[in-house]
Image: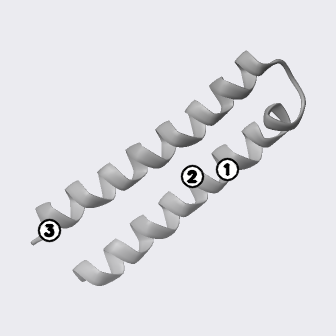
Amino acid sequence: MDKRTAFIYRLLFGVVLIGASIFLSFRYLIKGPPFIKVLALALILGVSYLVVDYLKRKSKADE
């Protein structure tokens, strides 16, 4: 598998992970106390940061 195809698969997997975290925490963003809403937003931001960081590290390592 060449570098471009591997990056596309990693990117798609990252998009699925971010989408799943948004889907799972969306219920808590609509209903729930403010503390839970903050935790749900932190979950979305944390997962997004980790996925982007992983993609950047892997793309640098492949070069």
Q: Residue furthest right?
A: 31
Disc 1 element:
helix
Along the horizontal axis of the image, is 24 left or right of 12?
Answer: right
Q: Quadrant of residue 37?
A: top right
3 lies above or below 26 = below
Mark 3 surroundings: few (<14), some (14-19) or many (≥20) residues within 10 A: few
The residue lying toward the viewer, choosing from 16 and 45, is 45
The C terminus lies in quadrant = bottom left
| Residue type pointed to by label 3 | Asp
- Sequence-first tag of 3 and 2: 2
Q: Quadrant of residue 25?
A: top right
Mark 2 surroundings: few (<14), some (14-19) or many (≥20) residues within 10 A: some
Tell me which residue sits at (39%, 43%) in the image: 50
> How far apart are labels 2 and 1 at the CA level?
5 Å
Tell me which residue sits at (33%, 74%) in the image: 6
Residue at the spot of label 3: 62
> How far apart are labels 1 and 3 at the CA level?
27 Å
Label of residue 20 in the image: 1
| Residue type pointed to by label 1 | Ala
Label of residue 10 in the image: none
Residue at the spot of label 2: 17
> How far apart are labels 3 and 2 at the CA level?
22 Å
